[in-house]
Amino acid sequence: MGDRAVPGQDEQHHRELFSAKVMAGSRTYCIDVQRAANGAKYLKISESRRRKLGLLGEIPSPQ
């Protein structure tokens, strides 16, 4: 079928100026510097936490 461009994919690539992952214990922080539609730069920080598995391999529900 050939290569098809996904709408917005190329725009997203050009808007992202910098990206890094920082691991800190059981947490991972993703730091992105992006450019908004008006040209301003902004910082986006996301946090991800590793969760321990229970006895049966199930992920416990957050309390």
Image (cartoon, rainbow, N blue to C red):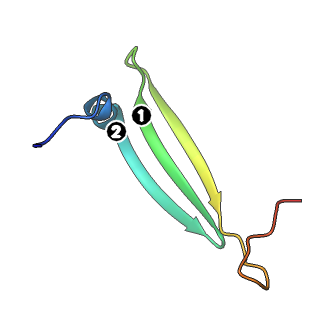
Query: First in sequence: mark 1 or mark 2?
Result: 2
Residue displayed at 39% across by 17% down: 37
Helix, strand or loop at mark 1: strand
Q: Is residue 34 above or below residue 63?
A: above
Viewer-proximal residue among 57 and 20: 57
Q: Amino acid at mark 1?
A: Gln
Residue occupying the far bottom of the picture? 55
Say which element carries label 2.
strand
Work out which quarter of the rendered image holds the N terminus and state it.
Answer: top left
Taking 21 as reference, is 10 left or right?
Answer: left
Query: What's the distance in space between the residues labelled 1 and 2, CA to CA?
Result: 5 Å
Residue denoted by label 1: 34
Q: Residue at x 63, y 53 (%)?
A: 47
Which of 34/50 is in front? 50
Q: Position of residue 57 (x, y in %)?
A: 71, 81
Quarter that holds the C terminus: bottom right
In-image side of 41 versus 1 (left or right): right
Left or right: 50, with 2 as reference point:
right
- Whether tag 1 and tag 2 are in contact, CB under 8 A, the answer is yes
- Which percent across, then down, holds residue 27? 64, 65
Residue 35 rendering spot, x and y as whole percentages = 39, 27
Label 1 neighbour load within 10 Å: few <14, some 14-19, many 20+ = many
Q: Is residue 19 above or below residue 57?
A: above
- Judged from this view, the residue extending furthest toward the top is 38
Most foreground residue, 59 or 13: 59
Q: Quadrant of residue 12?
A: top left
Amino acid at the residue labelled 2: Leu
Residue 17 — which label? 2
Residue 36 drawn at (x, y percent):
42, 22
